[in-house]
Image: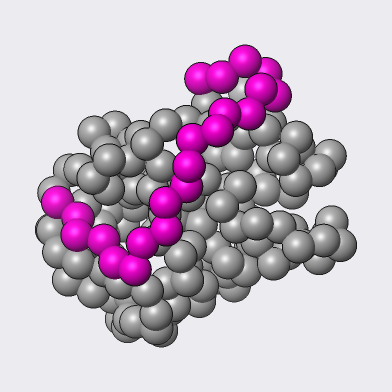
Amino acid sequence: MEYQVTLHNLFSSPRHNYFTRPKFEEGDAPTVSHQKFTLKVNRGIEGDRFETGLYPITFFSLEVAKLMEMAFDKEIDIQVFRRNIIISGINLCELIGKRFSIGSVTFEGMAHCNPCPWMNAVIGKGAYSLMKGRGGLRAKVIEEGEIELGATVLESATILTREAIAPLTISRLPKG
């Protein structure tokens, strides 16, 4: 299946600003904006803090960022979410455990990218709760290639049906 999507921002950062830092002590690592990425198998963005990590690429939905702006009645700098690829037109949670391609790059969606409590500090009280189930997608590169900003096609064998802002829901079996 082919889905029309737009890549709005491509970011990297050499160091963590939230993760690994004392509670609510924000770091000063720059967020670097790119026009395109060349991605290699099982690697993240060259020079990014997650380049060799278990989940080297993170996607975040522009629709979720806009939902947050409406909820907080303010403009939010998209960089505060600290994700690598800002995309619109797709529900990222539907790609967990699935392979998909954008441009010449094939990814595997690995896990939901849980928000951290830092979102309350940098956006406002309640941001963390609003992002639960909408924090984005952790992915790895299966086939290398390039992606670049702009309108493009996401290809996936999975039929995707949920709207972009619908949160991930996890069914739990009763204990016992």
Whether residue 144 is visible to the viewer of this picture, yes or no, is yes
Residue 77 or 87: which is nearer the viewer? Answer: 77
Quadrant where the N terminus lies?
bottom left
Q: Quick check: 84 above or below 172?
A: below
How many labels sit on residues?
A: 0
Residue 33 percent across, percent down from the top left: 42, 58
Q: Quick check: 98 above or below 57?
A: below
Q: Is 38 part of what is drawn in magenta?
A: yes
**In the visual, does 75 lie left or right of 2?**
right
Residue drawn at x 63%, y 29% as measured from the top left: 26
Residue 33 or 74: which is nearer the viewer? Answer: 33
Residue 24 percent across, percent down from the top left: 70, 24
**In the visual, does 7 lie left or right of 164?**
left
Residue drawn at x 81%, y 43% as measured from the top left: 124
Residue drawn at x 34%, y 82% as measured from the top left: 152
Image quarter of residue 163: bottom right
Q: Quick check: 18 above or below 66?
A: above
Residue drawn at x 42%, y 51% as measured from the top left: 32
Q: Quick check: 35 above or below 22?
A: below
Whether residue 55 is visible to the viewer of this picture, yes or no, is no
Q: Residue reaching furthest top?
A: 22
**In the visual, does 29 lie left or right of 144?**
right
Residue 13 or 23: which is nearer the viewer? Answer: 13
Q: Which residues are magenta?
A: 20-40
Q: Main secondary structure of the magenta part?
A: loop
According to the image, what is the colour scheme of the structure?
Answer: one colour
Quadrant where the C terminus lies?
top right
**In the visual, does 60 lie left or right of 75?**
left
Q: Is 81 part of what is drawn in magenta?
A: no
Residue 42 percent across, percent down from the top left: 17, 43
Residue 21 percent across, percent down from the top left: 56, 19
